[in-house]
Image (cartoon, rainbow, N blue to C red):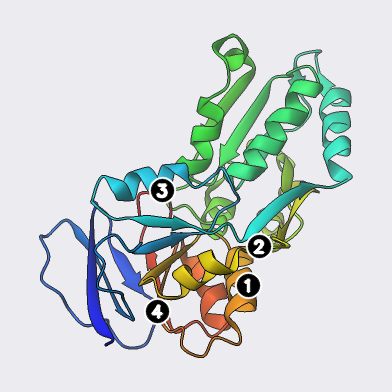
Amino acid sequence: MPETMNICVCTALSLVPLTAMPPRSVSCPSNFVKIEALASLSTSYTSPKVVVTRERGKNGSLIDALATHGIDCLELPLIHHARTPDFDKLSSILNNSYSNHEWTAFDWIIITSPEAGVVFLDAWKAAGTPKVRVGVVGAGTARVFGKVVPTLNPSLEVAFTPSKATGRVLAAELPNYGNMGSTVLYPASAKASNEIEEGLAKRGFEVTRLNTYTTAPVSHVDQMVLEQALIAPVIALASPSAARAWVGLTREQQRWDNAAACIGETTALAAKKLRIRNVYFPADPGLDG
């Protein structure tokens, strides 16, 4: 029999529904996040409660975080990343844009996702690790740069994070150091919107965007794992691409109407446009939310 399942994840942040009507309330301690979803569950207490959908090998942090709260996860990678010809161009631009043989000619390098960070670091190392000033969209992306080996740290300064981890806020708050407008190098996903470069351009920045990688749905999904995912109360979506991939898989599954917990508002809006009904996202985007 379908039943209502309340999942509370301990955090200082709040998860809000993307819907005109508020979710039904549940009784939780004040620092808890509330997700309420109708789910068709087996009676087994070991059934996974949250489906994690990032690229294979990149779900560990979320799985571990939820495990500390006693929440079992099912890993169902929905997307994979592939580098584009602009990746080689990025390394060449970094290598050829030294100023005073030390700093690159760009005032800012803007990185808006962990994957974009990984791709940038590979190109940066191939270019000889020139000095760069980096702005990141949020704490999750910043952590990628925290893994740079100490001997290279002096060449890479993470100098800006916006007050809220969204592209719109980043574009509104990035410091403009140049008299005629700062120069920005923006290595991004080919699927990313134009929100950041358009927002920066309106403020007088000169933006060079390179689509250094792309995101695509996985070509194969294990059907047994998919069947488990369809009855889990919550699916975690970390990008609009993951939302599109999930809808593509479940388009013919009329029975799926559970909750989608999105990493931020951008993904939540994409999920809602795809007609996912029960959409939630944290007030402060990121893994902790």
Indicate which disc, 4 or 3, sits on the residue closer to the N terminus.
3
Q: Residue at x 86, y 32 (%)?
A: 93
Give above or below for 265 relative to 126: below
Q: In this rendering, which labeled residue sits more in front, label 2 or label 4?
A: 4
Characterize the local packing of mark 3: few (<14), some (14-19) or many (20 or more) Cα atoms within 10 angstroms: some
Asked whether residue 178 appears in the rendered view, the answer is no
The answer for how far apart the CA atoms under marks 2 and 4 are is: 30 Å
In-image side of 187 versus 16 (left or right): right
The residue closer to the viewer here, 184 or 24, is 24
Instruction: Please identify the quadrant where the C terminus is shown.
Output: bottom left
The residue closer to the viewer here, 161 or 238, is 238
Looking at the picture, how far across and down is residue 100, in whole percent? 80, 14
The answer for how far apart the CA atoms under marks 1 and 2 are is: 19 Å
Q: Residue at x 36, y 88 (%)?
A: 20
In-image side of 96 versus 55 (left or right): right
Q: Which residue is mark 1?
A: 244
Q: Which mark is residue 62?
A: 3
Q: Which mark is residue 195?
A: 2
Q: Residue at x 77, y 30 (%)?
A: 123
Looking at the picture, how far across and down is residue 106, in whole percent? 75, 33
The residue under label 3 is which amino acid type?
Leu
Indicate which disc, 1 or 2, sits on the residue closer to the N terminus.
2
Q: Which residue is mark 4?
A: 258
The residue under label 4 is which amino acid type?
Asn
Q: In this rendering, which labeled residue sits more in front, label 1 or label 2?
A: 1
